[in-house]
Amino acid sequence: MSAPRRLLPAVVAGVATAVVRGGLDWQPPGGAATWTRTNHRGEPVSLLEGPAVAAGVLAGALVGGGARATLATAVAALGGGAFGLVDDLREDSATRTKGLRGHLGALARGRVTTGGLKVLGIGASALVAAAVAPPGGGAASKPLARTADTLASAALVAGAANLLNLLDLRPGRALKAASLAAAPLVGTAGGAAACAVLGAASTAVEADLAETDMLGDAGANAVGAVLGTAVVLGAPRPVRLAVLGVVVALTLVSERVSFTRVIERTPVLREVDAWGRRPVSSPATGAAAGGPLPS
C-alpha cells in the first residue's frame, strides 16, 4: 500500500468521526440525557463519542483496502458498534451482570442480558469477518485447517473487541492502547483498518481526555473489532495465534485482577496512562463540572 493510500483511511476516519460527533451534538437521538453517564469521578460524561468513533472507523475502513479486506473490516466495525450501542443504551442496571463470565453464565441459565446479546452478536459478526478476510500469510490448504484458522481469527476479532472495552475505564486509556496496537500494522495488509483506527482515535482523544466524552461499548467494541481484523489481515498465522493467546490471557486475568490497579502500580504504565489527562485534584470545567452537556 502506497503512502497516500495509507493516509486516506486515517483522514476519512478522522473527518467522519468529527462530522458525526458534531451532528449528534446538534441533535442527540432521544435527547442528551439518553447519552449521559457518570464517570469515575462521579461527573457527567457523554456516550456520543462511541457511535461517532464507530462511524469513523467504518468510513475509514471503506477506503484504501481490497474488496474482501474492506468487507471484513466493515462487518467487524458494524457488529462491534451496533451491539455495543445496544448494551450502552439498553443495559439492565438492576441486575448488575458484569464481565464476560457473568454474561455467559446468564446465557447458560437461559437469561439473555444486553451484554449476553452483545457477546452473541459480536461473535457472529466476527465469524463473518474472519470468513471473508484474506488472512495474512495466505489461507491454509486443507479444509479442516482453514476452518480452524477461521475460528481462531473470529475469536481474535471478538476477543479484541471485548479487551479494548475492558480498558475503557479511564479517560483516553482505550484510545491510547488502540493507537499503540494499530501503529505496527500500518505497513501490513491490514494497514487500511489500522489507519482508520488511528484517524478516529486522533479526532476523539481530545474530548475523551477532557472527560466530556467516553467511548462506551459502541466505540470500544467497534475499534477493538477493527484492530482484531487488522491483525487477521496483516499478520501470519503464528503471530495471529500468539496475539489471540495474549488476548485470551488478558481477558481471563481481567475477571480477577483490576487493570487499573496494575497500571497505577507500574510507573511506566501509570505515566503513559495519565498523559494528557486532567489531574485528580484539578477542578472540572464545562460538561465535566456538571454544567449542561451539549444538546
Image (spheres, rainbow, N blue to C red):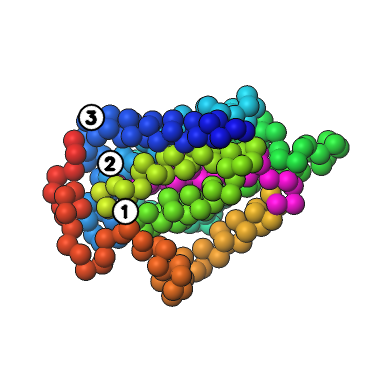
The residue under label 2 is which amino acid type? Trp
Q: Give me the C-alpha separation between circle 1 and circle 2.
A: 18 Å
Residue drawn at x 32%, y 58% is 276
Identify the residue at the far right of this view: 142
In the rendering, which numbered label is found on residue 209? 1
Q: Which residues are magenta?
A: 213-239
Quarter placement of the C terminus? top left
N-term-proximal mark, 1 vs 2 = 2
Q: Which residue is mark 2?
A: 35
Q: Nearer the viewer, mark 3 or mark 1?
A: 1
Q: Which residue is mark 3?
A: 27
Q: Nearer the viewer, residue 110 or 237?
A: 237
Quarter placement of the N terminus? top right
Helix or strand or loop: what does disc 1 sit on?
helix
Residue drawn at x 54%, y 51% is 181
Q: Give me the C-alpha separation between circle 2 and circle 3.
A: 12 Å
Around disc 2, counting alpha carbons within 10 Å, would you say few (fewer than 14), some (14 to 19), or many (20 or more)? many
The residue under label 3 is which amino acid type? Gln
Contact between labelled residues 3 and 2, with CB atoms less than 8 Å apart = no
Q: Position of residue 111 (x, y in %)?
A: 49, 46
